[in-house]
Image (cartoon, rainbow, N blue to C red):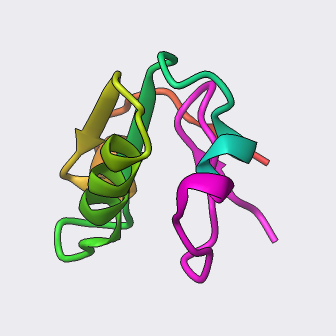
Amino acid sequence: MDRKQAPRGFSEPADTETNCAALARIIPEKGRPALFYCNGVKCGRSAVAVKIARQCGYTRLYWYRGGFEDWKQKNYPYLKK
């Protein structure tokens, strides 16, 4: 299956639980910038994930409200695995 993501990003399937342990595996340094996004504006998982990351001590958090489809439509770069 092809998975698309923002450059230097990490794409997690929708059924992945977001908690401090899972975030530590993906983003080991809490001061590293982390961008969260969903499939679209109606998806709320990324906003919840940002709140959880903040509670886990992450400090450089960014949320892209438009979601991945909006990212592509704006011709922002992305990776296709």
The relative height of residue 76 versus residue 24 in the rendered view (above or below) is above
- Report whether residue 74 is seen: no
Residue 8 sits in quarter: top right
Q: Is residue 39 left or right of residue 28?
A: left
- Report whether residue 46 is seen: yes
Give the number of marks. Answer: 0
- The part of the chain drawn in magenta is 1-22
The relative height of residue 30 versus residue 57 in the rendered view (above or below) is above
Instruction: Depth check: give the residue in front, 40 or 30.
Output: 30
Residue 78 sits in quarter: top right
Instruction: Depth check: give the residue in front, 47 or 3.
Output: 47
Residue 19 picture location, percent across and down = 53, 63
- Is residue 5 a member of the stretch shown in magenta? yes
Please identify the quadrant where the N terminus is shown.
bottom right
Residue under the point 47% across and 16% down: 31
The relative height of residue 5 versus residue 9 in the rendered view (above or below) is below
Residue under the point 62% across and 74% down: 16
Q: Is residue 20 left or right of residue 73?
A: right
Residue under the point 68% across and 30% down: 28
